[in-house]
């Protein structure tokens, strides 16, 4: 078995990239590319598990690519491409659909959340989404997967699928069991309106999130309107657990100012949330507004973005085809 470390992760082109995607995934992607081999994918096949307007999807694929680059991903260091351009993802997903178990999928909380009350009306694709995610990772025999905490359960399923394939086809260690890389300080950025829900692209209210494309003015307005608390900031983390919106603001501030939550609470305790909000606005504008400007600039040359995706998909395809050859052989396909 190759012991080579390889990073794989993906982002759905389902609309505005936000601060949750940035802190939970993109920033980590960038730091990993410094000393590891990395493959980063715009997972367009995942996006269509919920209906996407075709014209909008096309634009979102390029915008997500621009978001990757604007956050600091370098196509000369990392492989950057879109999922549907490497057909091996769909082929391996089918094989893994036959390995994965209904009982495992029935436990996936994201399906329950996204399907809502009427599960019968959800697409089959949404139900088997975690098997496609397992295929994305295992197609490259990736060993490390940087994700937000919301994807932890899906990653555990990928490990179960890999293990079962290795057992069923009697090829111990054929697929490595991928390790999640989840940030300890900020594993889940929460909505600015409801601290019990994660910040998400599909949340109706734009005031619930900071988009990477937001202008300085929009950031200012959103943080001003963000839910916090009428009492001064407490000095005890336990008290903050009952105030999820306040805790979220402090956690984001700690992460962006590169300190830990304890130190931030010590620095801020007894003060009004208006002070925290002013400091948070400043640091967000400093870090996020330039990313947004760069995304807009990159989107002026869509041909160049398409060229980067094409080059990336050619590189990804070489690895995918080599692995698929062995996978087909293990399964007994000719
Ligand atoms: N709120 C979050 N906090 C931390 N990490 C997050 N991620 C997403 N939201 C947060 C991480 O970003 C990566 C890409 O996610 P995705 O866009 O592919 O899918 P998602 O998790 O379903 O994101 P959204 O925003 O909630 O999209 P919609 O609304 O379209 O479903 C992943 O690593 C994810 O963990």
Image: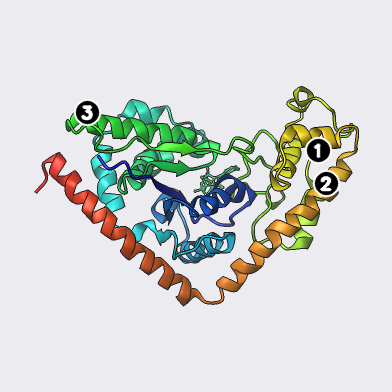
Direction left: furthest residue? 334
Residue 213 appears anywhere in the view: yes
Report the number of discs. Answer: 3
The Cα atoms of the two marked residues, 1 and 3, are separated by 51 Å
Direction top: furthest residue? 238
Q: Quadrant of the N terminus?
A: top left
Badge nearest the viewer, 1 or 2: 2
The Cα atoms of the two marked residues, 2 and 3, are separated by 53 Å
Q: Residues within 10 Å of mark 1 (few under 14, many from 20)?
A: many
Q: How is the image coloured?
A: rainbow
The Cα atoms of the two marked residues, 1 and 2, are separated by 9 Å
> Mark 2 or mark 1, which is nearer the start of the sequence?
1
Circle 1/circle 2 CB separation < 8 Å: yes
Residue at (82%, 49%) from the top-left corner?
279
Instruction: Determine if the C-beta at disc 2 is less than 8 A from ligand 1.
Output: no
> Mark 3 or mark 2, which is nearer the start of the sequence?
3
Residue at (23%, 42%) from the top-left corner?
95
Circle 1/circle 3 CB separation < 8 Å: no
Q: Secondary structure at mark 2?
A: helix
Q: What numbered label is drawn on residue 167?
A: 3
Choose between 129 and 291: the one closer to the eye: 291
Looking at the image, residue 324 lies above or below residue 152: below
Residue that numbered label 1 is attached to: 228
Residue 202 appears anywhere in the view: no
Residue that numbered label 2 is attached to: 277
Task: Tell me residue 100's x, y (percent).
Answer: 29, 33
């Amino acid at each position: 078995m190759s012991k080579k470390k390889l990073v794989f992760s993906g982002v759905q082109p389902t609309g505005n990239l936000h601060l949750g995607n940035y802190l939970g995934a993109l920033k980590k992607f960038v730091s990993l590319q410094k000393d590891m081999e990395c493959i980063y994918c715009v997972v367009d096949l995942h996006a269509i598990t919920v209906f996407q307007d075709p014209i909008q999807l096309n634009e979102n694929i390029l915008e997500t690519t621009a978001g990757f680059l604007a956050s600091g991903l370098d196509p000369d260091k990392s492989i950057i491409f879109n999922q549907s351009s490497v057909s091996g993802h769909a082929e391996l997903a089918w094989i893994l659909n036959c390995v994965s178990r209904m009982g495992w999928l029935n436990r996936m909380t994201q399906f329950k959340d996204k399907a809502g009350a009427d599960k019968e009306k959800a697409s089959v694709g949404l139900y088997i989404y975690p098997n496609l995610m397992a295929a994305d990772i295992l197609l490259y025999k990736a060993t490390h997967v940087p994700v937000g905490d919301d994807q932890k359960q899906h990653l555990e399923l990928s490990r179960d699928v890999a293990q079962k394939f290795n057992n069923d086809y009697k090829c111990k260690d054929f697929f490595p069991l991928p390790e999640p890389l989840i940030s300890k300080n900020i594993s889940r950025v929460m909505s600015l309106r409801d601290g019990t829900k994660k910040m998400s692209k599909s949340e109706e209210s734009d005031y619930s999130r900071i988009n990477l494309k937001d202008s300085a003015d929009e950031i200012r307005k959103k943080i001003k309107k963000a839910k916090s608390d009428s009492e001064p900031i407490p000095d005890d983390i336990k008290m903050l657990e009952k105030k999820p919106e306040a805790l979220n603001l402090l956690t984001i501030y700690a992460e962006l100012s590169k300190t830990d939550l304890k130190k931030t609470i010590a620095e801020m305790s007894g003060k009004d949330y208006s002070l925290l909000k002013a400091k948070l606005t400043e640091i967000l504008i400093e870090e996020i507004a330039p990313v947004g400007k760069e995304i807009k600039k990159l989107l002026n040359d869509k041909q160049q973005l398409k060229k980067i995706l094409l080059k990336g998909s050619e590189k990804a395809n070489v690895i995918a085809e080599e692995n698929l050859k062995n996978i087909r052989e293990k399964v007994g396909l000719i």
